Amino acid sequence: MSRLIIAEVLKPQGIRGELKIKTFTDYPENVKAFKTVYIDGTAYKILSFRVGTDGAAYLGLRGVPDRNAAELLRGKTIEGEREDAPALEEGQYYIVDVLGLSCETEEGEPLGVVVDINNYSSDIYTLEKAGKRILFPAVKGVVKRVDLENKKLVVDKKIFDEIAVY
């Protein structure tokens, strides 16, 4: 079974072991879809989940009974089983599926391999080619096709050349 990184523990919340988390899902509520979450390889059942008025997400886990236990999880990543992940809409992909794809132009010119994706106001893709890194934002129009079957990410060369940072 493969796992997806779905969130990061920011800090304890209150005295009952609740965790304030930063979600890496499109919608924070998607975290509730996971029956079990994993932190440092340890399985935890979700007891509670809520989104606060401040937009932050809060998670209660079986086995994290108090603030001291929650404090030990500060800064750790939260993973979920891929099988529990919500279905994606057409044109959406999990980052783990895009990592490792070869990136090329529509004409077939190789640009590198996707080695990292960071989420800011838009996703920033990092390619690696011959030991050099190329970064580009996944803005409208640049990514033409994600072909998981053939392990390719196809981009528009003109837009790519305008926005890529070498």
Image (cartoon, rainbow, N blue to C red):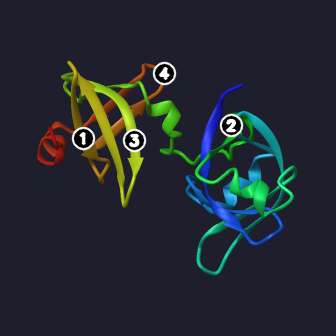
Q: CA distance from mark 4 to mark 2?
A: 31 Å
Mark 4 or mark 3: whose residue is earlier in sequence:
3
Image side of residue 161 versus residue 35, left or right: left
User: In the image, what residue occupies the spot 12% across and 47% down?
Assistant: 162
Q: CA distance from mark 4 to mark 3?
A: 20 Å
Q: CA distance from mark 1 to mark 2?
A: 30 Å
Mark 4 or mark 2: whose residue is earlier in sequence:
2
Residue 29 vs residue 116, the one in the foreground: 116
**What amino acid is found at the position of numbered circle 4 in the picture?**
Glu
**What amino acid is found at the position of numbered circle 2 in the picture?**
Asp
Nearer mark to the viewer, of 3 and 2: 2
Please give the residue where the numbered disc 4 appears in the rendered image: 149
Please give the residue where the numbered disc 2 appears in the rendered image: 40
How far across and down, in percent of the image, does residue 132 sit?
A: 20, 27
Image side of residue 44 versus residue 120, left or right: right
Q: Residues within 10 Å of mark 1 (few under 14, many from 20)?
A: some
User: In the image, what residue occupies the spot 30% across and 53% down?
Assistant: 140
Mark 1 or mark 2: whose residue is earlier in sequence:
2
Element class at badge 3:
strand
Nearer mark to the viewer, of 4 and 2: 2
**What amino acid is found at the position of numbered circle 3 in the picture?**
Ile
Q: Residues within 10 Å of mark 4 (few under 14, many from 20)?
A: few
Nearer mark to the viewer, of 4 and 3: 3
